[in-house]
Amino acid sequence: MRLELTQKLQQQQVLAPQMILSMDILLLPTLDLEQRIQDEFSENPALELVEQEQPAVKPEPASGDTAERPLDERLRDSRDWSFEDKNPRKSSFAATDAKHAALQNTPGKPPGLKESLMEQLRLKRIPELTREIGENIISCLDSRGYLDCAPEELSDWIENNPAPEEIKDALEAVRGLDPAGICATDLEDCLLLQLRRDGENHRLEEAIIGGHLQELSQNKLPALARALGRSVEEIKKAAELISSLDPMPGRQIDSEETVYIRPDVLVEEVDGSLEISVLDYSLPRLEISRSCRTALRDARKDREASAFLRRKIESAKWLIQALEQRQRTIKDIAVAIVEHQQDFMLKGPEQIRALKMQTIADTVGVHISTISRAIKGKYIETPVGIFEMRYFFTGGVDNAEGEIESRRNVCRRISNLVETEDKKKPLSDTALTRLLQEQGLQIARRTVTKYREQENIPASRLRRSY
């Protein structure tokens, strides 16, 4: 073992900062891109927002204006770069008043599960101690509405270690709130709480839930009938009632944040032809600040200030070029997709064709990774609806005409066959494969099984009706 110093010559590919920025910008959806532009605008004094209604070229400042003042006075703060008399940000920030008004009129997020239960508990006529313990219990519920710990463990962490009788009273109070089934310890407990809420006699249903949920999930109704000494018809009615219960009642209230979709591309049918446009009207227009250019000319003798200004202007140019390149790339990809999916655009989703990313990459003349990055999180509005751009890329199987049938059409055929089957004798995957082959598709049974599972269609034994 020894220590030595050696030299090594090798080639290494390093991405330029412009390329990294371009890839980042291309990856962002429209809403995230708007925020990214605002962040860049706040940090870079060389960027200026252009009002849509006004020409991009700004008049030169008059004599005695900001540009005539010394550099050290105009550039007070290198982090903010606020120009006193002629601030290019004033017009853009003045337009935010309307946005603030819109935000004030936007409805807030609805109360979640725990907030709703807390409000219900405060309205109940119960002792104050029971209410306090109940609030602690509610804080232990997960998004499904289930209790995260065993009831006997509650006294260990609740303040003042309440007695078991006090915890029992609080549990009953919480379990009496809406929706039914809240504060259950497991699935069986959740279903039983919902059954007992209406006060009717459900002995058969309780017996099935108490010891035969596994058989019920496997649709073994005759075996259940023999085990419980009931008829298959009685078991069937009980199974229908149990299936109407909610295994996760907390999800009824604990709503997730709404995700808004803004299409990036619009496809319109005009006189029988398809017109494509990139929807970038919501993106602010950027240009290099004339005030910053003027400051750069005045700072020729100040190397530090000149280097700082050149760096900021260069960064601003990179951003503007990346935005322009993003729009061109998305437009080219959208045009290529529409050319391959014209029947889909004009006749509906049933006419979707199998399409690979490599095909679009070859058409546009870019790498397949660029296609994957460009379509991520992007949506396209077509005459038949709004779809994610990734929706149009699907594999398929060969048909009798020698063409490739898209995977989505094959899944649609499987769903149609299942919907029209005899429920007392449901079609097995082998039978589905045979029917599809008779329709001209060259498909294997394992492929049918995979597509059926992707469509969340149960197996034949689970679809059987007694």
Image: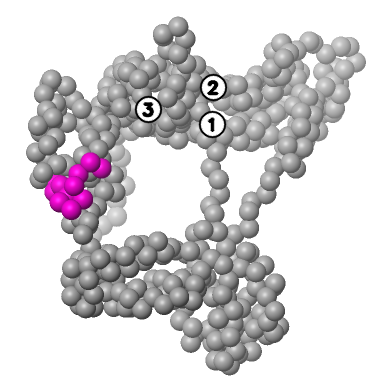
Range of the magenta residues?
Answer: 419-429
Question: Dividing the image into 4 quarters, which one contains the C terminus?
Answer: bottom left
- Cα distance between the residues tagged 3 and 1: 21 Å
- Amino acid type of the residue tagged 1 in the rendering: Arg
Q: Residues within 10 Å of mark 3 (few under 14, many from 20)?
A: some
Point out residue 397 in the picture as x, y percentages from the top left corner.
17, 31
The residue type indicated by label 2 comes to Leu
One can see residue 365 in this view:
no
Residue at position x 83%, y 22% in the image: 86
Gap in angstroms between the C-alphas marked 2 and 1: 9 Å
In the picture, the quarter occupied by the N terminus is bottom left
- The type of residue carrying mark 3 is Thr
Q: Residue at x 45, y 75 (%)?
A: 200
| Residue matched to label 3 | 370
Quarter of the image holding residue 416?
top left
* Residue drawn at 17 percent across, 50 percent down: 426
Task: Determine whether, in the image, residue 154 is placed left or right of residue 427.
Answer: right
Are the two marked residues, 3 and 1, in contact with CB atoms closer than 8 angstroms? no
Q: Which residue is mark 1?
A: 262
Q: Which residue is mark 2?
A: 279
Could you give the CA–CA distance between mark 3 and mark 2, rounded to whole angstroms? Answer: 20 Å
User: Foreground: 450 or 87?
Assistant: 450
Instruction: Place residue 311 in its image quadrant.
Output: top right
Residue shown at the point (42%, 32%) measured from the top left:
388
- Horizontal side, residue 372 vs residue 403: left or right: right
